[in-house]
């Protein structure tokens, strides 16, 4: 048997182990990057309120910060794999609203980012945080790594 420090099929993680990690790192980084300017700048948040108002959102003064802070918090949660399925569910709602309320009237290219984030969120809701997540430490391997489709007896 080769030394354990060598990268062999036995020591490398499987794709099933890496998929949730890769999705979490991509989605978490994207969410933080795309929302941080609104979190850190009142002027940018005001612009986002105006953007939502332009598309007929009710109470944009409430919904803009709610959406921005939800994205920022979900990004942080996904990076660590903390409450992954909850964060993913919140982002599914956020991006379904974005795609149905805003993006039908915008060019196709502008819908790709929220569509990609919706796809990542659905995958993370189904997969969970995976092997390398705080969820696994808290919930144990059986719950954190079990696909949601297999959650029912």
Image: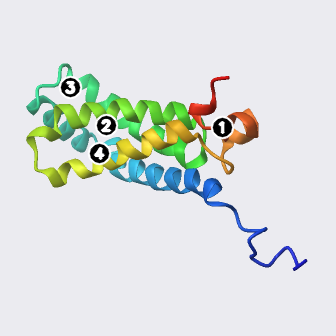
Marks 1 and 4: which is nearer the front? Answer: 1
Marks 1 and 2: which is nearer the front? Answer: 1
Marks 1 and 3: which is nearer the front? Answer: 1
* Residue 65 in picture, x, y percent from top left: 31, 31
> By what rule are the colours in the image chosen?
rainbow
Q: Quadrant of residue 13?
A: bottom right
Marks 4 and 3: which is nearer the front? Answer: 4
The answer to whether the residues at label 1 and label 3 have Cβ atoms under 8 Å apart is no
Left or right of residue 62, residue 88 in this image: right
For the point 52% across and 37% down, which residue is it? 126
- As measured in the structure, the alpha-carbon distance from the residue carrying label 4 to the one carrying label 2 is 6 Å
Viewer-closest of 118 and 151: 151
Which label belongs to residue 60?
A: 3
Q: Earlier in the sequence, mark 4 or mark 2?
A: 2
Q: Where is mark 2, residue-wise?
A: 95
> Looking at this rendering, what residue extends furthest in the right direction?
1
- As measured in the structure, the alpha-carbon distance from the residue carrying label 4 to the one carrying label 3 is 19 Å
Q: Where is mark 4, residue-wise?
A: 114
For the point 88% across and 78% down, which residue is it? 3
């Amino acid at each position: 048997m080769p030394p354990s420090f060598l990268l062999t099929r036995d020591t490398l993680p499987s794709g099933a182990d890496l998929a949730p990690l890769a999705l979490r790192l991509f989605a978490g980084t994207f969410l933080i990057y795309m929302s941080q300017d609104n979190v850190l700048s009142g002027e940018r948040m005001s612009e986002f309120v105006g953007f939502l108002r332009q598309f007929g959102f009710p109470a944009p003064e409430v919904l803009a910060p709610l959406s921005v802070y939800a994205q920022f918090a979900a990004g942080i949660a996904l990076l660590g794999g903390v409450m992954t399925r909850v964060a993913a569910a919140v982002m599914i709602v956020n991006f379904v609203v974005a795609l149905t309320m805003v993006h039908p009237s915008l060019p196709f290219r502008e819908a790709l980012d929220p569509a990609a984030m919706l796809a990542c969120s659905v995958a993370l809701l189904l997969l969970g945080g995976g092997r390398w997540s705080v969820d696994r430490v808290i919930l144990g391997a059986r719950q954190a790594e079990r696909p949601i489709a297999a959650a029912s007896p």
